Amino acid sequence: MFLINCPFCGERDQSEFSSGGEAHVVRPKQPTELSDDEWAEYLFMRKNIKGIQFERWNHVHGCRKWFNVVRDTSNDKILSVYKMGEKPPVNYK
Amino acid sequence: MSNYRIHKTEYIDETKRVSFKYDGKTYFGYEGDTLASALLANGIHLVGRSFKYHRPRGIVSCGAEEPNAICQIGSKKDLTEPNVRATELELYEGLEASSQNCWPNVKFDIGGINNFISPLIPAGFYYKTFMWPKSFWKKVYEPLIRLSAGLGKSPTEPDPDIYDHKHVHYDVLIIGGGVSGIIAAKMSAKNNLKTLLVDDKKILGGSTIYQNNESIKIDDKLSSQWLKNEIQEIKKLSNLTIKTRTSIAAYHGYNFLLAKENLTDHLPEEKKKNNIRQRLWKIRAKKVVIATGSIERPLVFNNNDRPGILLSNSIKKYLDYYGVTCGENIILFTNNDSAYETSISLHKKGIKNIIIDLRKSTSSELIKQAESLGIKIYFNHVVTNTFGYRKINSLEIMELSEDGNTTVGNKIKLSCDCLGMSGGWTPMVHMHTQSGGKLDFRDDDQVFLPKENSEDQISVGSCNGDFDLENIIDKTVNKINKFLDIDNQDYQDTNILCSKEKDKRNIWLLPNKIPLGKTKCFIDFQNDSTAKDIKLALKEGFRSIEHVKRYTTTGMATDQGKLSNMHALGIIADTASVKMGTLGTTTFRPPFTPLTFGTLVGRNVGKFFEVVRKTSMHEWHVENNAEFENVGQWKRPWYYPKNAENMHDAVQRESKAARDSAGILDASTLGKIDIQGSDASEFLNRVYTNAWSKLAIGKCRYGIMLNEDGMVYDDGVTTRISENHYLMTTTTGGAANVLSKLEDYLQTEWPELDVYLTSVTDHYSTASICGPNSKKILNKLFPTLDLSDENFPHMSFKEVKLENINCRIMRISFTGEQSYEINIESKYGHALWKMCIEAGKEFNLTPYGTETMHLLRAEKGFIIVGQDTDGTMTPSDLQMDWIVSKKKFDFIGKRSLYRSDTVREDRKQLVGLLTDDPKEILEEGAQIVSDIKSKPIDMLGHVTSSYFSPNLNKSIALAVVRSGKTMKGQKLIIPMENKNINVTVSDTIFFDKENKRLNA
């Protein structure tokens, strides 16, 4: 079970959090301009990486804030956490 | 009292006699015994029958690896426990145990016939046999298999015992209190680290605590003596917690571990009562030291499973620790030095024994010691067969060929009453692999070892493949210093004397003159798989160890292959001529030893099993005979039966009353979200499909919320309380998810919006009064409020005082009647409800539950999200195109509403259904077809809501039907088990289509 370092509350047990899938999937500003395929890309397509993955987590049973996590899915190590709106750390790709 | 307890030890208190029952007969042991040691002291080896062949089986080991001595404890329906290992169960006064898997009893077992038909039940027997005819499966095969499957009996009544959970945090956790664990604990705790040491046994010390061999000494003391001093010392350390009778069940990521602490299992019945039986420790440790030791391996030879055949080191423990000898004429069969320790211990206590050693010759200190004591050793010999039905009485040995592949010379027959076997040692790498660690194979002694230790965990001692004491202590000290980044000097000058093993000879399947097909060389004792089964699986094409395991069931019993997995792998490697290290192992899954469900569940039983939410009016509902429905965690009144009414009658009465005069519903459970901020209107524009900016203050509006995929997610009425203040209601079940979804968008997509969300579901209680007389009742409650349609029209809101208390009244309707929802602070909810009931008496104000609410709204064709929708319905599918704004630039899900799939005309769409026979009520979920003759029948949709309407005096239903929008008036068929029901597609609104009643 992960220990997640919430950027607002500090280290907490995974059971306080819920996962929100891939991070940095930006909702298109003008959805009406998009073709079906482009919209489907936003709507349905997500990465499923073995290795370093950027993902969203919500401290749902705590401060209820959403934030981003960099996690290596091959060993579940969390490498970094950062707030919404902050730039992802550059040293992971 | 018996011949087999031959000397006193400090671990057995002979002043405290303990009586116990085994298979109905009373025996005696002493405090300090396990059930197994007490049975052995009474000369009992035979403790069970094997799973498949029902062969007599005896105690094999002295610990968690025990495959045979598993018993049923107690006989009470609520407290009996199956599959308890007699080797781990501490004896207590009044213990009742019985053997398993035998009928009528362990000495004469009818199932034993399986042993003679064993050629007919090879590996994969079930898969091969119970195939045809197909019709036999349900009536013959399955009942038969169920009858013979499983070991022991589970309790049939709820467990009355108390279990507990505890969360703890430590700097260092040490698993295992043997010599290396004790050293690690001392080093850690003395360096100011908060340390926890756990061990599954009653006392610390592992196997060193009874190691009294003269050639193994530390600082010139017997190693047991030295370790006892160490234990005394660590008990004084203030930041070290020691937990005995505590076993680690699971090692999860991030050093999160579960441990089971046994608190009362060793106590007599009267002391168990009202005490916590077991405690589950949930441990977070910064660092973990694994010092779980190793398990002795059996040897695989013909008839290696007879009672009286034990692991060699277990014979030593029964003797040196419990004072019990397993026989009077013992043979030890070994491929390594450790059996010599057993031999020397036995010899010292005057027990005659001889050694059969696979090795050609060898000459360590231990061997010299044994030779000097005159113990007879047969080098380069192998046991080829054993004899004796209920207990071993003799065996045959032969000389090994040079290459070890076959036997040579003549059989030598030796008599004995006990055989100890030692096939070397298997490091317990379970914890390491459970945590995600990988393994390496060491060819030298054929063991899997932890591949690398991480920053967070390390393996020390024999679980890391270090077997002699000097190696164990030196390496442990060095590794712990490094791992904990400390510089402990306590063991710098420790002087260790031990015997060093010089030769090894490992043969997984020992050679025999008898063809393999005619032997019984057991690998997995509990599941009865033999070397022959493994070879058959290979012959049939299985290669992966995971497949062979499942096909032969090797390692799949309650002991999870602790004794058998290595031999299975070895035989596969030898047969397939591959290197064992390349085969890998099967996965080591938690728990290490079985856990009771009680331990896992802890206190969350009975009323603590799940959170129950009750409205403030709940007591009134209970007093008034309500039947309740669970909606999420909420208890909602379902209907209020009067005078032994059934549900149908109650609902018909309630529905009629609501339309004829007045009804009242507890609507407190609806989700309520308070929305404030200068961008609140814009926010609603983005989350609902319709427009919100122009909603006047004091007005209410119904909204539908979509997912980004365009499917209906939730609905509810939102009220504009002031310029920048709204109160949103959601469905009861959707409240929490809707709030989360709105927060997600606010925080991640639209952080620029000035909006604040607060869940106020529990803050307000809601009484909803509807019906033609509702206005009169409201007037009695709020005499100063102008209830005229001009002042307080449908879809508007007033803030009024009831006595001194503020109420928010929304005039909104889910029933089609004039309807007022009175919201009040929850603490006044109960009082408000009672005042409403009182005021409504003269108008036959009838309380109604969720079932009547569903019926009334169905008469009006109002959807229930989650009942009439299922995550695949767009507003258009629901024939609610009117609620989707064409003008708004964007809202959640808008773009998806004109994807090629969502604009298809043949989507399933919501329609009404009327049965040709108005008395016929459809079943919700029933399939709808148009042609019952075609095969396969084309399924057009299904019924989503169905009721008998007392106000229309006919059956009505809502359904989703392919291209339903265009089918009005068409005949369709609902095929049921016994008949076909004819229906006609109708409008979704059945009652008061013109909405006249809202303003009547």
Image: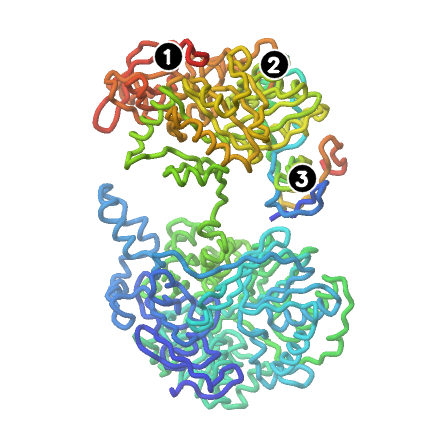
Amino acid carrying label 3: it is Cys
Q: Residue at x 32, y 9 (%)?
A: B969
Secondary structure of the residue carrying numbered label 1: loop
Residue B445 placed where, x, y %? Answer: 56, 67
> Would you say B36 lies left or right of B373 here?
left
> Would you say A41 lies left or right of B86 here?
right
Query: How many C-alpha atoms fall within 10 Å of the one at disc 1: few (<14), some, or many (≥20)?
Result: some
- Mark 3 vs mark 1, CA separation in Å: 47 Å
Amino acid carrying label 1: it is Asp
Disc 1: which residue = B987
Residue B695 badge: 2
Residue A63 badge: 3
Which of B879 and B335 lies nearest the eye of the viewer?
A: B879
Q: Are marks 3 and 1 on the same chain?
A: no
Residue B433 placed where, x, y %? Answer: 57, 55
Residue A47 placed where, x, y %? Answer: 61, 32
Amino acid carrying label 2: it is Leu
How many numbered circles are shown?
3
Which of B560 and B152 lies nearest the eye of the viewer?
A: B152
Q: Marks 2 and 1: which is nearer the front?
A: 2
